[in-house]
Amino acid sequence: MAVISGAPLAVLIGALIVDCGLVAVAFYSFLKK
Amino acid sequence: MDGFSEYTQSALEILRQPQKTMHWYVVPLLLITMYIVTKQLHEKNYKVVLGGFALWGVDIFNEIWNSMICFISGYAPVWGTPVGVGNTAWLLMIGYNIEISFMFLIMGVTVCLMLPEDPKKKILGINNRIFYCIVLTTLAVIIECFLNYCGLLTWEWAFWQRRSPWILWLIGYLPFFSTAFFVHDRPTIKQSAAIVGGIFAFDFILIVICAFLGWI
């Protein structure tokens, strides 16, 4: 199993930020009164 | 890295080469998908269709960054669809085939049809949108793990394995369902369509950049 690092890790972190951002916006709207 | 993994090499041999891999079943699969979408449009379920397209578009975003990791690392995608097991009819990106593509569009429409009319209704004390996000994401990850076990999906990075499925859960599926439901619940069709348009515009720009850089 390879361990991710360097530029591929940066891509993964970018993807995490976008995906988690989508989840955060959606969940906020679901829970908003 | 010492070059592309064996699984990745096998997938690269058929990447976007439908003349080597095409099967007849793709045509009826296309028609089934068209029927599902057309049926919803006829019933004026525009929110359901747009929610479905939102899920499809967010998956395409994930498929793009998966491809980027493959080509930037020169080793492997986070998830791959190799030759030999579950042969695809058309490999569109390194971990994304035509069957997965149709599946995600059908999935998007299907999950939006499951939603209760009232977005604030609670199930087991939880907001129903969040309830469905959690349940559907968990089911989808279980199916992904099964596909990996069967060899249809290869996972060659240490952080993306069956023993640690939480990251699959967090970025593999949760954004799909939550974005689909968010788009579905917008007060106007115009707003839903604008968000879907934004998702596809973002995907398109990323694809153009990645194509230019040889990352797709």
Image (cartoon, coloured by chain):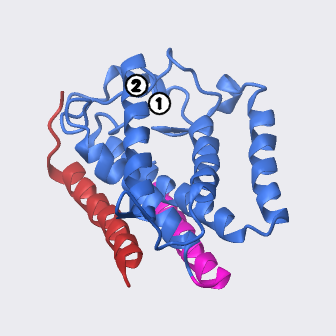
Chain colours: A red, B blue
Q: Is residue B10 above or below residue B29?
A: above
Magenta span: B187-212
Q: Is residue B156 above or below residue A26?
A: above
Q: Residues within 10 Å of mark 1 (few under 14, many from 20)?
A: some
Q: Is residue B202 visible?
A: no
Quarter of the view holding residue B71: top left
Q: Closer to the observer: label 2 or label 1?
A: 2
Q: In terms of depth relative to the viewer, which is nearer, B207 or B57? A: B57
What is the secondary structure assignment of the residue under circle 1?
Answer: helix
Residue extending farthest front = B124
Q: In terms of depth relative to the viewer, which is nearer, A5 or B28? A: B28
Residue extending farthest right = B42
Residue, x 73% and y 25% (percent of image)?
B23
Residue type at mark 2: give it: Phe
Q: Position of residue B169 (x, y in %)?
A: 31, 47
Residue that carries the numbered disc 1 in the rendered image: B12
Q: Main secondary structure of the magenta part?
A: helix
- For disc 2, the chain is B
What is the secondary structure assignment of the residue under circle 2?
Answer: helix
Q: Quadrant of the N terminus of chain B?
A: top left
Sequence-first tag of 2 and 1: 1
Q: Is residue B192 magenta?
A: yes
Q: What label does residue B146 carry, if any?
A: 2
Residue, x 39% and y 62% (percent of image)?
B130
Residue type at mark 1: give it: Leu
Q: How many numbered marks does the figure carry? A: 2
Q: Residues within 10 Å of mark 2 (few under 14, many from 20)?
A: some
Quarter of the view holding residue B133: bottom left
